Amino acid sequence: MRLKYITIAASVCAAATLAGCGETDGIGSSLIQSDNDIVIEDNFTLTGHSVINDKVQSRTAMLLLGSIDADDYGHFESDFVTQFMPVAQLDTTLTSAAAIDSVKLKLMYAPGSFVGDSIMPMGLEVYRLTQGLKAPIFSDFNPADYYDASKPIGSAIYVTNNFELSDSLKALDHRDIYVDLPLDLGVELYNLYQSDPQSYLSPDAFAKHFPGIYVRNSYGSGRITQIGATQLQLYYHFDTKNSAGRDTTYNYVGSFYSATPEVLSNNNIEYALAPELNQRMQDGEQLIVAPAGLEVEMEFPLLDVVKYFRQNSGRLSVINNLTLSIPAVNIANTYGIRPPSQLLMVLKKDKDKFFEEGKVTDGITSFYATFSRSTESYDFSSLRDYLLDALEREDELTADDYTFILTPVAVDAETISDPYYGTSTVYVKAIVPYVQQPAMARLKLDEAKIQLTFTNQSVK
């Protein structure tokens, strides 16, 4: 469909006074008239197909634990490995290794941050890594050579419902899974700081002494839990006298070691596509399945857009915008699995480098869109710079310039508001592969809307 609006611009009169443009008073004036044609064209076709995406780089402190089997999704399971970021220094003046009472692993998750059955008891086991993790690390990582399966250092049974929680705990913005670890580990880490404080100055230095942990699902199936924070905590006491001179013991908890985005961590994912999804993919449906499932390879009709613009523009034409809206629908399932929140649209040739180098979108080779539940679509609001760049390199364009990958991502962004002007600006800090929880959607590329808007100006 092509819509064309013709607007006749007002005559511009340059004169020494505010006299009307039609007046001639001998002082002298000039008259410029112009017509502006605003052209909107959306008769373009998007094509693409699903491709396997079985290896992603986590690059996040969000860790997945558990296993589910869903007839309409497939079999998904995840365990994880992680290093730890130590605090820069420990207080050794008021306490000692002998004052350490216990050590716990604390796994924190937000209420509702799981897929599956909240009341199903599931078990986990914790192992100490026997060697350091090596970057880069991907979702198909096999930890078998990195731990001793005969020496677990902790285990726990857990659920994710809040039936037994007090009202005060229910009001918190997180839930906790605690795992008792050997007291010797806390003593070892405390003594390490006393003997070699430099080992606490960086995660790499710390990992040479304590490479990290491996946490695996040991019992049960039916739930994937999204761990938002992972900490090693030391419980210790301090003996002193109070103001009345009586012996007093104070108990403390120190979260001295955390799994942060700065350290190496990884979700070790195994995913088997449901036969129903595989058949739909074979039938030509464009499916997004995550984590580490399916993404979509897409051909953007760049050459058609360039051709249309060249044939219908003039010397003074200005490109207003180029937008893309891709409808997406939820795939019916029994686990409440929904479309991923964001999609990255990146040139296929640049995808691996984009994630390996920790890039953010540049508006020319990469873009991102957020899923709108109201319109059930991913809307890429501005591809204008992409088109301008293509017009400058028109004779050099190849398939590499319009073959894109649509892949699920998590976007870390910050919105800065200016109260004076009433405006806000979104700054993207990081874009990483989506590994939050199972997600899937069917993209309807045949119904996608690509809209080119430009203005033709003619001067009389």
Image (spheres, rainbow, N blue to C red):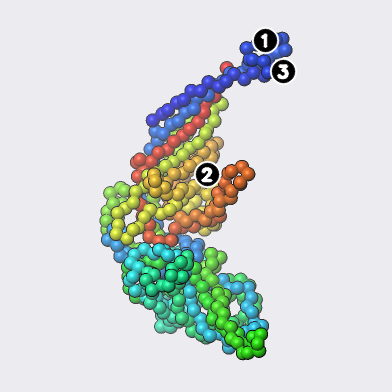
Q: Local crowd at mark 2 within 10 Å, few (<14), some, or many (≥20)?
A: some
Residue 389 picture location, percent across and down: 54, 39
Label 2, label 1: how many angstroms apart (C-alpha)? 51 Å
Q: Which residue is drawn at 43% across and 31% down?
A: 41
The residue where tag 1 is placed is 24
Q: Which residue is drawn at 35% across and 58% down?
A: 337
Q: Counting residues from the N terminus, which is met first, the one under dot 3 or under dot 1?
A: 3
Q: Is mark 2 on a helix, strand or loop?
A: loop
Q: Do the residues labelled 2 and 1 touch (CB within 8 Å)?
A: no
Answer whether residue 148 is visible to the viewer in this image. no
Q: Nearer the viewer, residue 268 or 21?
A: 21
The label on residue 16 is 3
- Quadrant into which the C terminus falls: top right
The label on residue 364 is 2
Q: Residue at x 29, y 62 (%)?
A: 70
Q: Counting residues from the N terminus, which is met first, the one under dot 3 or under dot 2?
A: 3
Q: In this view, does 285 lie above or below 174?
A: above
Q: In this view, does 427 lie above or below 233?
A: above
- Quadrant into which the N terminus falls: top left
Label 3, label 1: how many angstroms apart (C-alpha)? 11 Å
